[in-house]
Image (cartoon, rainbow, N blue to C red):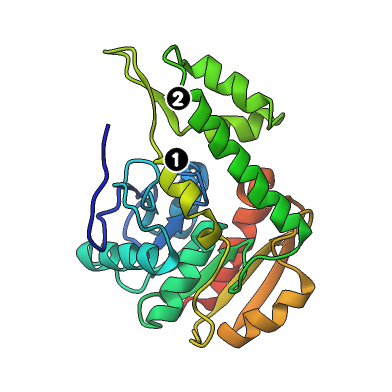
Amino acid sequence: MNKTTSGSAVKLAFDEYRTFKGMASGRPIIFLHGLLGNKLNNRGTSKHLSRTLSKVVYCLDLRNHGDSPHNPNHDYPSMAQDVECFIRDHHVKQPIVIGHSMGAKVAMSLALRDAKTCSMLISVDNVPKPNTGNDVTAEISKFKKYLNVLREAFTDPRVSLKSVDSRLELVEPSQRIRTFLMSNIKKDYGSGDVYCRIPIDIIYRNINKIFEFPYQHEVFNGPCLFVRGTDSHFIQDTDEEAIQARFPHYKIEDIKAGHWIISDNPQKFRETVKRFIRENEK
């Protein structure tokens, strides 16, 4: 299935959750997934936040992920522009934007490009600067391995869901992470064909851009929460200066988890997010 487009912004696929009774309360929430993720990753948390906060929650597929179109440009200005167009086209007024990892950098880019776009920012395990350090370099290398394995898997004319998972197991022993990665692999039960929903070559060519951050002078003065996994290396104590420079009204909350905070410790994450929103919503 070829979903490649050219040009600037792409129309993003999304799911909308209204699991509350009665009228919506306050600003809606936009939820942005991370690299190689999709809008279904945060479905459970989105339903919970919608029900307990009485909010509409939109989970988006970022470009080159999930059901959204493919585009050769995969950088933060392009991804932020896509979300800006979604907000405009769907008449979403100053949403609370939550993003994990790559999605966190898209959320930060969105806020810094135009401070009026969102009312509140929640960055999950990422910072407004290039990701550096040996541990992060190892994380980049891991994602490259995933992409190489997927690329090689689809050179086999007999590729199957089982064969892709078996190949991934050679580089990723965690069943939970493989299940996350396998959400990108689908089977057409009509034809029997197995296909990859993400454009592997586009992501691979742009992967270094995903760990960079282009906005180093702009400032967002709205309330911001930075959620840090205590077993992750994406937010270091030394990063606080960069956070304060771009987002002066910030708060850092530690959660016992690795980089995959939302799935590692969902209860603590949900309670942390709800408390922050309730404290800051006007």
Quarter of the image holding residue 201? top left
In the displayed structure, would residue 235 be above or below residue 204? Answer: below
The reply to whether residue 46 is visible in this rendering is: no
Q: Nearer the viewer, residue 120 or 189?
A: 189
Q: Nearer the viewer, residue 188 or 280?
A: 188
Q: Which mark is residue 155?
A: none
At a point 24% along the width and 68% down the height, the residue shown is: 88
- Which amino acid is tagged 2? Phe
**Image spot of residue 265 (x, y percent):** 69, 47
Left or right, 142 with reference to 3: right
In the displayed structure, would residue 116 be above or below residue 57? Answer: below
Q: Nearer the viewer, residue 229 or 136?
A: 136
**Image spot of residue 123 (x, y percent):** 57, 66
At a point 63% along the width and 47% down the height, the residue shown is: 266
Q: Which mark is residue 154?
A: 2
In space, the residues marked 1 and 2 are separated at their CA atoms by 10 Å
Q: Indicate the quadrant containing the C terminus: top left, top right, bottom left or bottom right.
A: bottom left
**Image spot of residue 17 (x, y percent):** 36, 48
Circles 1 and 2: CB atoms closer than 8 Å: yes
Q: Which mark is residue 200?
A: 1
Q: Is disc 1 surrounded by few (<14), some (14 to 19) or many (20+) residues within 10 Å?
A: some
Q: Indicate the quadrant containing the N terminus: top left, top right, bottom left or bottom right.
A: top left
In the displayed structure, would residue 215 be above or below residue 98? Answer: below
At a point 43% along the width and 53% down the height, the residue shown is: 50
Q: Nearer the viewer, residue 274 or 121?
A: 121
At a point 40% along the width and 25% down the height, the residue shown is: 186
- Which amino acid is tagged 1? Ile
Q: Is disc 2 surrounded by few (<14), some (14 to 19) or many (20+) residues within 10 Å?
A: some
The reply to whether residue 213 is visible in this rendering is: yes
First in residue order: circle 1 vs circle 2: 2
